[in-house]
Image (tube, rainbow, N blue to C red):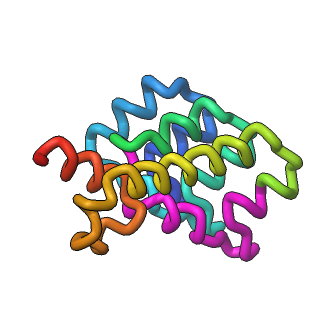
Amino acid sequence: MNKKGESLLHFAVKSGCSPNILECILKKGVNALLQDKEGNTVFHSAALAKNIEQLRCLLHPRNAYNGFERVLQIKNKKGQTIRDICAQIDSISITALLENYNLLVLKIKESFSDIFENHEDFGDDLSAIYSHLWKT
């Protein structure tokens, strides 16, 4: 962590690193939900930079942390969620990405409802859902 409370992943996102670099950092176990001193996660930073490729990488199921809804609910110190930032910067493409991801979560749960009806603990965590499906 630097003086701004940023992790290596924060720095990589703010520096505009490619999704491949982000993947390497995430594989080392860096928590994407860590907030810097301004309360921003890497998701906030990628949205502010309008970097849809970084967001797509961060939101990918293999990189998801604690579920999609959790990512959407985190507020920075200005009280902004990622959706608030998208509205502020008028980013239709990022808003569409978030909505498509949300629909994907719902569709997977619906398609495999028989598997998940007794597993409410999955919430909207695609990583856990995919892991469970591969074991089934």
Nearest the viewer among 11 and 53 is 53
Q: Is residue 73 magenta?
A: yes
Which span of residues is magenta-colored? 63-85
Residue 96, located in which quarter of the rendered image?
Answer: top right
Q: Count up the numbered dots.
A: 0
Nearest the viewer among 112 and 23 is 112
* 90 relative to 14 in the view: left or right: right
Q: Position of residue 37 (x, y in %)?
A: 59, 68
Q: Where's the N terminus, which quadrant?
A: bottom left
Q: Residue at x 68, y 59 (%)?
A: 82
Q: Position of residue 65 (x, y in %)?
A: 38, 56
Q: Is residue 29 above or below residue 18?
A: below
Nearest the viewer among 2 and 112 is 112
Q: Residue at x 28, y 38 (%)?
A: 27
Q: Residue at x 27, y 46 (%)?
A: 130
Q: Position of residue 47 (x, y in %)?
A: 69, 47
Q: Residue at x 57, y 35 (%)?
A: 54
Q: Position of residue 63 (x, y in %)?
A: 37, 44
Residue 116, located in which quarter of the rendered image?
Answer: bottom left
Residue pushed farthest left? Answer: 135
Q: Is residue 40 above or below residue 17?
A: below
